Amino acid sequence: MSSASVPNLTSKSSHPPGDFAIWIVIYVELLTFGLLFMGYIFSRRSNVELFNASQLVLNQTSGFVNTFILITSSYFIVKAVQSIKIMAKEQQEKANLLASKWILSAMFLGLIFLGIKVWEFSHIFSLGITLSTNSFFMFYLMLTMFHFMHVMLGLIIFFNIYQKMRLHGYSLKDHSGLETGASYWHLVDLLWIVLFPLVYILR
């Protein structure tokens, strides 16, 4: 078999997916959350009993449900990207339609995540807990609210992507915007996967 008949499967994997700017954002966000996580760990080492007692106020079940929700939503985003890459070669309109359904499904799960967090915040605040209650709740509220805002931004990004999909705006050659949004959402997912066991489970 001649080398000309072998498809080049590696030529498109030499650079990260999406726009270069999103990877700067991702690295900055990873650094920011990393510093907060380290601050939490060092503070916990000095106040283990306080952190363990305060942790009992949190609802681990809602945390587990939200973890499942974000992981599932990331899977839906992967399917959206695959729909464009696999189908758009000959059926761009159909590919955008299918991808838009995956995006809407991911957005729906993202809204459920936010709803559960609002319920959880309401419970915490109803107990009179604030940032100044103790060091555990300071970190808990900072980390979860900061992450909450990232989920909201991700949903805004997906809404704009969905609007473009309705116009059949993505193709096999031009889907960088979709990959950019997907990369950001995977960051949101990754941060929660670290945040959840660290804040809700670690004892």
Image (tube, rainbow, N blue to C red):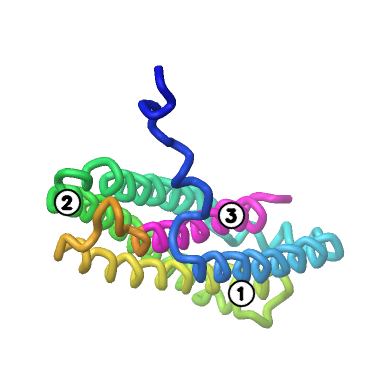
Q: Quadrant of the N terminus?
A: top left
Which residue appears at 80% of the width and 67% of the height?
43
Residue underneath mark 3: 196
Cα distance, mark 3 to mark 1?
13 Å
Cα distance, mark 2 to mark 1?
43 Å
Amino acid under label 3? Phe
Q: Looking at the image, is mark 3 or mark 2 nearer the viewer?
A: 2
Amino acid under label 1? Met
| Residue 184 among those drawn in magenta | yes
Q: With 129 as the anchor, is 52 left or right in this view?
A: right
Amino acid under label 2? Gln
**Magenta segment:** 179-203
Q: Nearer the viewer, residue 36 or 131?
A: 36
Q: Looking at the image, is mark 2 or mark 1 nearer the viewer?
A: 2
Q: Nearer the viewer, residue 180 or 124?
A: 180
Measuring from the top left, give residue 190's x and y in whole percent.
Answer: 55, 54
Which residue appears at 17% of the width and 51% of the height?
92
Residue underneath mark 2: 92
| Residue 85 among those drawn in magenta | no
- Neighbor class of circle 2 (other Cα within 10 Å; few <14, some 14-19, many 20+) is many
Cα distance, mark 3 to mark 2?
39 Å
Work out whether mark 3 precedes mark 2 in sequence or the reverse, and give the earlier one: 2
Secondary element at image label 3: helix
Residue underneath mark 1: 142
Which residue appears at 33% of the width and 63% of the height?
111
Measuring from the top left, give residue 162's x and y in whole percent.
Answer: 24, 64
